[in-house]
Image (cartoon, rainbow, N blue to C red):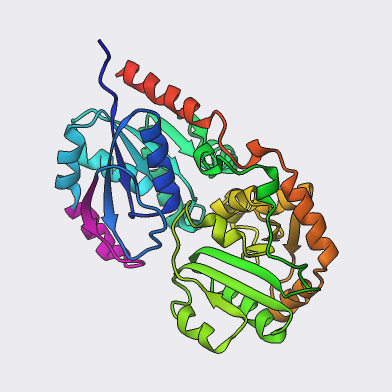
Amino acid sequence: MTSSPLRILTVLPVLGQPRDSKRVDMLVSLGFDVTVAAFNRAYHSGRMPSCPTLIIGTISHGNYLQRIGKMVGALPKLRRAMKSRDIVYASSPDMALLAMLAGLLLRKKVILEVGDVREIQTSDGFKGWIVRVIDRFVTNRCALLVVTAAGFLDNYYRRWLRSNVPAIVVENKLEASAAAGRDQSTRGNLPSGRPLIDRPLRIGYFGLLRCQWTWDVLKAFALKHPQKVEIIVAGYPMEPGDIASQVTSIPNITYLGEYKSPSDLPTLYGQVDLVWACYKFISPKDWNLKWARPNRFYESCYFGRPLISRSGSCDSMEVERLKIGLNINSHDIPDVVAELESITVDMVDKWRANSIALPIDLFVYTDEAEKLKSHINDLSIQS
């Protein structure tokens, strides 16, 4: 007689965020009985979870006081959902705290996954101190911490919070199923012709489009070189929110709208030479940008596309070490454009060859899922 699968409730701050949906699908693939409890929000819905979903509220971007009220209002519905589940898997400290409040006296173990460390968590002064006190309180009451970058664990949780909660690193890599059927040669497929010789250089800017500085740089580069450069943009526009209307007057910038991950990734990456993964200037206290490694790093490596990265970011160290792209040092837009103008076809060819030669375990999951499964099963035994 076989035992019933563990019942996991994943609590998400937004529905459709690719990283969260990727983790949900991983849990489903491991044989767990997974249900999602999530908030509705105007956000990039590039990937929806493949399991039953319960909407526990609607929140808006940036309205923090209203958001707190909505979260408090979601407590009864979340508590009812938790009663029939064995373990709660919360995406972000906010959701972990919400689950703990909703589950008072239910004795449900909570797993916390962290994909970002926000500025307020590392800020100076009384406000930052209070946030870290709360963060430490929540983290130490979780049964397991899952982080998407080793820097989060080593620096913030171990050194800053001095938390010894059991932890595992599960990076934002591609699933083996998403990578199946694409070998080394197909990864390197490119548009016909050589960039800057036979056709314009094509730069892709994909994902949650929320960096005004990035948009200003790419637009300035495109406007200065209308015959030499093409910019391909895809994703959910937040800042600026009117990208679709702006590009109508710029022939060498194309906005493709939102996309689905992972199904649309081969088409997106297959039409560009370089991928934009650069932030505005990183200050000494921009800790998240120094620790985080987003989806586009792994996607770019998988598709053999060199990156344009920001010096000082987590990505930049690998870009430099592996020789797979350009690290931007400047901040002022004309200076950044000048750095982009330094790119040659030989540089692109070299970076692309190095990208295609990368070992697959750098960007595709190997045994991470089984390690996570082992940790979760151990928690059920301890209950």
Front residue (pair 270, 278): 270
Q: Residue at x 47, y 53 (%)?
A: 263
| In the image, residue 69 lies in the stretch drawn in magenta | yes
Judging depth in this view, the residue of 58 and 203 nearest the camera is: 203
Whether residue 180 sits left or right of residue 194 in the image: it is left
Res. 173 in view? no
Magenta stretch bounds: 53-73
Which residue is nearer to you in this view: 197 or 123? 197
> For residue 71, which quarter of the picture?
bottom left
Q: If the image is split into quadrants, where does the C terminus sit?
A: top left
Q: Is residue 13 above or below residue 337?
A: above
Residue 87 at x, y = what percent?
A: 29, 30
Number of callouts:
0
Q: Is residue 289 visible?
A: yes
Q: How far across and how far down the image is residue 104, in percent?
A: 20, 35
User: Is residue 21 rendered magenta in the image?
Assistant: no
- Residue appearing at x 52%, y 31% in the figure: 368
Q: Quadrant of the N terminus?
A: top left
Residue 58, compared with residue 146, is above or below; it is below
